[in-house]
Amino acid sequence: MSTLFRNFVIFLLGLLVIAGLLSVVNFERTTMERADIGKFVSQVRAGEVARVEIKGEALLVSLKNGGKETVQRESGESLSSLLKNYGIESEQIQNIEIAVKRDSSFTYWLSALLPFLIPFLLIGAVIFFMMRQVQGVNNRAMSFGQAGAREVPAEAKQKVTFKDVAGLKEAKEELYEIVEFLKNPKKFTALGAKIPKGVLLMGAPGTGKTLLARAVAGEANVPFFHISGSEFVEMFVGVGAARVRDLFRRAKKSAPCIIFVDEIDAVGRQRGAGLGGSHDEREQTLNQILVEMDGFDPHAGTIVVAATNRPDILDPALLRPGRFDRRVVLDQPDIKDREEILKIHAQDKPLAKVMKLRTIAERTPGFSGADLANLINEAAILAARRNKKEVGMEELIESIDKVLLGPERKSHILSDKERKVTAFHEAGHAIVGHELPGSDLVRKVSIVSRGRAAGYTLKLPSEDRHLKARAEFLDEIAALLGGFVAEREVFGDVTTGASNDLKVATALARRLVTEYGMSDRLGPRTFGEHDELIFLGREITEQRDYSEKVAQAIDAEIDSIIHGARVTAESVIRDQREVMERIVTALLEKETLEQAEFEAFFGGQPVPQPAAQDSGSKGIVEGKPRKAKEAKEKRAVPQLGPVVV
């Protein structure tokens, strides 16, 4: 559409130019009056003529009153002889200014031929534009099989190196061999070593797979070809394979270089698996990738780096030795890595003098690098909205809640009764989580609506953990039921606010029985086989490998776990009823309690008051945990991410 509009504008401008030329050529003819020789002679005799310009056989007469006329004289006759033949005296001729102007044959022929040439010029212009359109279609058709890989040259100004990638120590060590080979291949070839042809980066979304691939190219100072797996496949059969050939051909010309294929699972999924058969075009593309990687010269210096977050669905032929024979796993960052990532993303942002990024790292378990970058950006936006010159701890803490749960729903105004129910519900979660040693530390309790939640209790561990025992799971289920139990104990009834808590608690209890083998009654075994449909890319079916009798036993064991957790939560709520009333009163007044403010209710200490916003709130500083919490930190309780109930 844009090309058609541009051609139309060019065509319109051409018409305007032609019209302008015609107006210039015909200007004199349209403004001058034609007169015969007799009239001209009488005007000369009367002394009305001021100037005569001789232009070929035409006389351009300028009168003293400002008028202009044109007179056509006989060919071969001069002006003086013409006037003498009509009896004009030489004295009268001397008073007239006479000028001779050579007639331009170009102007004459242009004025004569242009009316006939205009239709032919218009037809030629239309044919020219039509041919250009056809030529453009042909060029696009010929370039349809060319890969649209974006090339980052080796001499690019903004290079990414390993210094720009925080954490991922093991992954960078694995990839440093690739860098060494690209820099000094003779070091390896002298010993007969062959560098891997393909490197597969595996990790959750946002862990830095693309960033790490760019860092490899930046460290090695080689060209970097970046393309997504979805860019190979088109609606026409054979286009994907043609683009693969073109990509590898371009890469071989720029060797040594790196080819980075992002989201390779778009074309590298297992062949012959899926509902309704397979996609022929995708399989042809995958086959071409396999053939090209087999044909690589081991010393050519062209290395394929691919990234995926679904390595389980890739075709086995793609993962065999000789293709993607090196696999690098990118884990979620631990607390030290998160602190380094925060420092990198905070380099170009003015932070307050009193800034503890370590505290932010402790509050963000399970956050990926992309989540942390979004966290810093949200804090900067929030500081700008508050007309601040620096980003403080208050903005960072509030941004954590925004990333986890969403922005505050200020328009979602609860009634006094609903606020009271929400306060007791969240206080129940917090108290049970605080008293049970297997639960994580309560970092914040709030009745401010965020996302779809009317309130929330944020529980985070003090350190990163990767293993979790049965006792910790049971305490976690009891904490999830704390809100349900608190509502029943105080109001004698329950609301729909506990629906999501019950769903999470039931799913966790089922995993204890069917996946983790933590049931004393059913023993250490798993129940059910989950089939992943490669075509859809998600788990939608579960095949039973147990009888109906065992299914009843599973349900009974889940009920037993839920019932035991409920009894535990009821015992804690009844023992701490007075504390819960005080916490609810504070929540109805302040709406949010930080960790130090919350724990002050249990130690008999005065509730700390927030300080100035620039230095951060005292509630943000970690409070001193009770003995139960000290024991909780010493136990090896894992935490895969923040818990919000």
Image (spheres, rainbow, N blue to C red):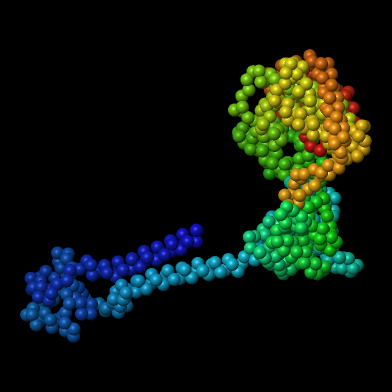
Residue at (63% x, 60% y) in the render: 235
| Number of callouts | 0
Residue at (30% x, 66% y) in the render: 23
> Taking 179 as reference, is 236 left or right?
left
The answer, for residue 152, to whether it is visible in the render is no
Q: Relative to the observer, which residue lies in front, 424 or 36?
A: 424
Q: Relative to the observer, which residue lies in front, 162 or 520?
A: 520
> Taking 78 as reference, is 448 left or right?
right
Residue 561: x, y in percent?
85, 28
- Against 214, residue 505 (above or below) is above
Quarter of the image holding residue 323?
bottom right
- Against 65, residue 536 (above or below) is above
User: Quarter holding the C terminus?
Assistant: top right
Residue at (87% x, 68% y) in the render: 189
> Taking 85 as reference, is 12 left or right?
right
Residue at (75% x, 18% y) in the render: 488
Residue 461: x, y in percent?
82, 32
Residue 83: x, y in percent?
11, 79
Residue 119: x, y in percent?
35, 71
Among all residues in the image, which is located at the extreme bottom? 76
The answer, for residue 421, to whether it is visible in the render is yes
Q: Relative to the observer, which residue lies in front, 19 or 40?
A: 19
